[in-house]
Amino acid sequence: MHQRRYFGMTVVQVGILAGLAVLVGSVLCVGLVLILADRAASAAPREVVIASPALATPPPMPTSAPRPTLTPEPTATPGVTSTPVPGWKRFEGSGAELWLPENYKGGNPATGLETIVAEIRALGPDFDEIANEVEQNLSDSHVAIFAFDANVGDALTLTTVQVISESLDSDVEITMDAYLDAVIKNLPADYRVVERKIEILDRYQAGRLSVDYKITDQQVSVFRKRLIYAIRVDDAMWVVQYLTERDDFKDALPIFELSIQTFVVQPK
């Protein structure tokens, strides 16, 4: 069945583009907060270490030549292995990985953008425009993983999973509560935060937000939900978000909550 179009796109296309725009925009705005915090830290006075003066009496010479010290062989940092979920498959990109059900498609836009675009086009001709937009918007972005549920069913919009990272200075100190404050501040005014908490995942501490919003024009209104996780790993803040229609969220939530438990970032 041919889908109605709004603003020159189907409502599916509007939904997925809105999710991408707000995700990247919110995190980049948070980046401004972190940059300011970093500048404030760099302006703070630093402790000056004064070297000890030379000894007046030189130390006695050793009676025997010292044995050469062997340089230890460098050892590789062990990788982190996520726990597989039976019947699911692994998605990875930019050192991050998570697991999703077999009906999800996508991957790392940096290395597999052509494949992602082709998979979206395979959903039907109504998705050609969104495939073009994804091709343009993900070709140079912070998105490490982009996946979508290929079982569209009766939904008007795509269920998607998006993972992005934001580099931080290792000296930047920001609490998870402060980071969530910054994300919420940069969400559109019509977004409603219905849940906010900090929880412990399988490997990390994460800030969690659940947000309601809708896509609307004079002819249609589609309510959506976004489940957002913020996870700091070393010198990067990772944002993982799951987006779906509000009516589908209850059934999708157990999948989202299991998927985030599989999220890992490989050490550099």
Image: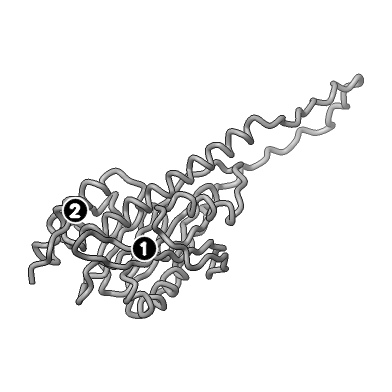
SS for callout 1:
strand
Q: Quadrant of residue 258?
A: bottom left
Q: Which residue is mark 2?
A: 114
How many dots with numbers?
2
Q: Residue at x 48, y 46 (%)?
A: 30
Comparing 114 with 224, the one in front is: 224
When the figure is inspected, residue 116 is found, relative to residue 151, above or below; the finding is above
Q: Position of residue 103 (x, y in %)?
A: 25, 74
Categorize mark 2 by other alpha carbons within 10 Å: few (<14), some (14-19), many (20+): some
Q: Residue at x 37, y 69 (%)?
A: 99
Q: Position of residue 25 (x, y in %)?
A: 38, 47
Labels 2 and 1: the sequence-earlier one: 2
Which kind of residue does numbered mark 2 sit on? Glu
Horizontal arrangement in the rendering, residue 194 relative to residue 40 (left or right):
left
Q: Position of residue 36 (x, y in %)?
A: 55, 36
Q: Which residue is most to the top?
A: 56
Horizontal arrangement in the rendering, residue 161 relative to residue 199 (left or right):
left
The answer for how far apart the CA atoms under marks 2 and 1 are is 30 Å
Q: Residue at x 29, y 63 (%)?
A: 147
Q: Is any atom of residue 92 visible in this view?
A: yes
Horizontal arrangement in the rendering, residue 128 relative to residue 142 (left or right):
left
Horizontal arrangement in the rendering, residue 193 relative to residue 58 (left or right):
left
Q: Nearer the viewer, mark 2 or mark 1?
A: 1
